[in-house]
Image (cartoon, rainbow, N blue to C red):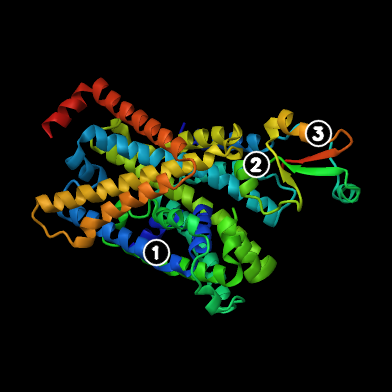
Amino acid sequence: MKSPILLSLALGCGWLFSPEVLVITGNSAGNLGLLAIPLLALAAFLFSTCGKAINSVQLGSKESSELQILRQSIGAIPAASLTLAACFPLLILAATALLVTSGYTFNEVFLYWFPNFGFAFLLLGLLTLVQFLPMKQLLRVQLFCVSLAGGGILILAVYGSGTSVIPLSALLHMPQQLSGAALSSALLLFLFAGSNLFHGQQGRFSLIPRLAFIVFSLWMFASLSHVNPERLASSTIPYMTASRRILGDTGRQIMGVVVVSGSCAAVIGLTLLCREKLTDLAQAHMAPAFLAKGGGRWILPPLVAIATGICMATGLAGDEILETLLRSALLLWLLYYSAVTLAATLVLKKEQQTVSLPARVAPLLLFTGLLAVLFTNPQRSEMFVILICLLVTSSALAALWFFINPKERLKKETL
Amino acid sequence: MKRLLPLLLLFFFAGASLLHASDVPTISKDELKAQLDTGKTVVLDVRSGRDWSSSEFKIKGAIRAAGDDIGKWSKDYKKDQKLVLYCA
């Protein structure tokens, strides 16, 4: 793909148009009312600032990956373990959740007779096969999914904003669901999971946050203009409720396409991100050498497909624990992102470069958001245990790698 | 091997998608509608997790119950009541 903007969109928008993000934005709009829009702007600004800080280090250094930035600040084993814990559980859990959601949507919106579970498995198989395509074709598929999902949301958002049934004066009222407001505000940070950390995106760190702000502020406004806030806040599928109110059955069908294509884009995007992280780990001698030259293309997709297939077949999607697991994985990703940004600002300071005030404050705000999600969540104790388990497992794996590879340990010591 | 791997995966997932639940007694939409009017039939939605949260269709008046906790909630209903479990 020659156009850098299209490449950035293909790589960075995967998670952005997934049903998970649509649930977060719908519930947040319900809990916060129109106040959700400035809070979304703040979240977008934070990620734009973080992207800029990370990008400044990447441009000025030969060792430009986030892993290398992190390694300079916290050492090899913590950097490797944080990378492993932040990316791989998120990919498997998100794939399980999104594919099952797609299965239900396909069954209920398009073909009643087609089993939802069957569709989820077929989609998993198809997405695994797509991963074996050459990168150029894979990025085209990804761009197609992103465009379909983004275009669908935009159509519904623009039409819904123009055909408001709830008067603006009513929309300007204070949020009524204050109990969920703190959690909803912090959850907006999850919109940007995995969007800024691709090598191909250098220099376009603010494209995705800006795009997210435009599309989702319109979508929130359209949702609030057609559905009452209490309904949006409590719904498990606020996107479907809003699209049905906006355009009737046609709206449901457009949203059905958005859900399926958005899920595909999220799974492909997160798999690409994990492939890139595997390559980074291998190039830094923290993973088997064959992964450094694109070996992840053949290894990762089948492993992810098997793990996701097992999760689906054993009924994880039908268990309430999946939501807690997924939210914990997203928290680890947020922890990773704040750590990389903090490490980038420290590197810039060390190199005596100017670090802007927002860049200095951004990691702290991200970390505060992380704590807010953790402590305002009813399942906080379970989430805390899951976070510890994932971090301990990934640290053990990273430590084991250095222990059984004395040569790699030597390279680490000489660095 | 690289060419064989995608084919093997395709067969695995195509096979998995053909899995069916074993036969259970079912009730048609019209039968259920007629029985609901008698007041002796209770519809229980035993879906959980994503199975419930991702679904747009929820039967009006259905009560949510955990499918693996029949022993607990079955005591709450009278013996002459008909329980219709809804799981997909």
SS category of the residue bearing label 1? helix
Q: In the image, B30: left or right of B19?
A: right
Q: In the image, what residue occupies the spot 55% across and 34% down?
A: A311
Quadrant including the C terminus of chain B? top right
Amino acid on which the number 2 mark rests in the picture: Phe
Whether discs 1 and 2 lie on one chain: the answer is yes
Q: For the residue carrying disc 1, how many other residues have a C-alpha within 10 Å: few (<14), some (14-19), or many (20+)?
A: many
Could you say where residue A51 lies in the image, as x and y percent from the top left? 28, 57
Q: Spatial distance from mark 3 to mark 1, Cα to Cα?
A: 50 Å
Amino acid on which the number 3 mark rests in the picture: Val
Front position among marks 2 and 3: 3
Whether discs 2 and 3 lie on one chain: the answer is no
Could you say where residue A77 lies in the image, as x and y percent from the top left? 24, 32
SS category of the residue bearing label 3? loop
Q: In the image, what residue occupies the spot 32% across and 51% down?
A: A368
- Which residue is identified by label 3? B24
- Which residue is identified by label 2? A117
Chain assignment, label 3:
B
SS category of the residue bearing label 2? helix
Front position among marks 1 and 2: 1
Chain assignment, label 2:
A
Regarding residue A2, the answer to whether it shows in the image is no
- Which residue is identified by label 1? A39
Could you say where residue A366 lies in the image, as x and y percent from the top left? 32, 52
Front-most of residues A54 and A391: A391
Amino acid on which the number 1 mark rests in the picture: Leu
